[in-house]
Image: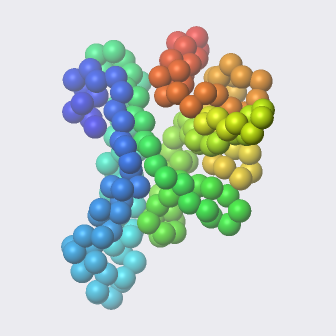
């Protein structure tokens, strides 16, 4: 990620991060690592590697003034899972969440949701702030909306984020 950001790439999209985690946890190496005394150490290592590969790098490159355009957006697309009564960032069980909570490191979390419209139509939207049942967050007034939704259009969302950041 760091290499791409420093070459002037403005958007880095990690699509589908939950599949990346699955690939690792289903690997023979990961499975074999669980046969020692500490069966949970492999999940701690996975959490540490997740943090170091994405979130520590994002912190290091965000707004440090060393990027050609001064900013690189890292977009992580991920599935959600039910945790109690809430849809949250899907990880490989609760072990990785005990080491690193990916959504807590993000400034903005958009949650894709289907919103019922008139006449039984449904529209895909991004939820911009947590409603108690879906994990989402964004700075106040970042998005020009009267409700908790914006169109499910990543291009429009990124433009709104850039406009908000440039006005700060």
Counting from the top left corner in percent of width and height, residue 134 is at 66, 49
Figure check: 109 above or below 51: above
**Quadrant location of the N terminus in the rendered image:** top left
Numbered label tally: 0
| Residue shown at the point (34%, 50%) measured from the top left | 52
| Residue shown at the point (53%, 48%) measured from the top left | 103
Q: Is residue 64 left or right of residue 101?
A: left
Figure check: 155 above or below 134: above
Residue 59 visible in this rendered orientation of the protein: no
| Residue shown at the point (62%, 56%) measured from the top left | 87
Residue 109 visible in this rendered orientation of the protein: yes
Figure check: 111 above or below 47: above
Quadrant of the rendered image containing residue 29: bottom left
Residue pushed farthest top?
Answer: 167
- The type of colouring in the image is rainbow
| Residue shown at the point (31%, 48%) measured from the top left | 53
Counting from the top left corner in percent of width and height, residue 19 is at 36, 56
Counting from the top left corner in percent of width and height, residue 46 is at 35, 63
Quadrant of the rendered image containing residue 72: top left
Q: Is residue 142 left or right of residue 116?
A: left
Q: Nearer the viewer, residue 120 or 18?
A: 120
Q: Is residue 141 left or right of residue 3?
A: right
Quadrant of the rendered image containing residue 83: bottom right
**Quadrant location of the C terminus in the rendered image:** top right
Counting from the top left corner in percent of width and height, residue 142 is at 64, 23
């Amino acid at each position: 990620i760091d290499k791409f950001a420093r070459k002037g790439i403005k958007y880095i999209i990690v699509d589908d991060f939950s599949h990346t985690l699955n690939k690792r946890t289903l690997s023979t190496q990961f499975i074999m690592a669980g046969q020692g005394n500490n069966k949970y150490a492999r999940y701690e290592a996975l959490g540490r590697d997740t943090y170091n590969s994405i979130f520590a790098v994002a912190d290091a490159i965000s707004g440090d003034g060393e990027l050609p355009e001064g900013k690189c957006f890292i977009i992580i697309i991920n599935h959600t899972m039910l945790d109690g009564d809430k849809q949250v960032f899907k990880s490989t069980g609760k072990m990785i969440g005990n080491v690193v909570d990916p959504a807590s490191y993000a400034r903005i979390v958009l949650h894709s949701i289907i919103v019922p419209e008139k006449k039984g139509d449904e529209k895909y939207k991004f939820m911009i702030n947590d409603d108690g049942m879906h994990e989402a967050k964004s700075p106040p007034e970042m998005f020009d909306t009267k409700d908790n939704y914006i169109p499910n259009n990543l291009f429009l969302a990124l433009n709104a984020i850039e406009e908000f950041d440039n006005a700060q």
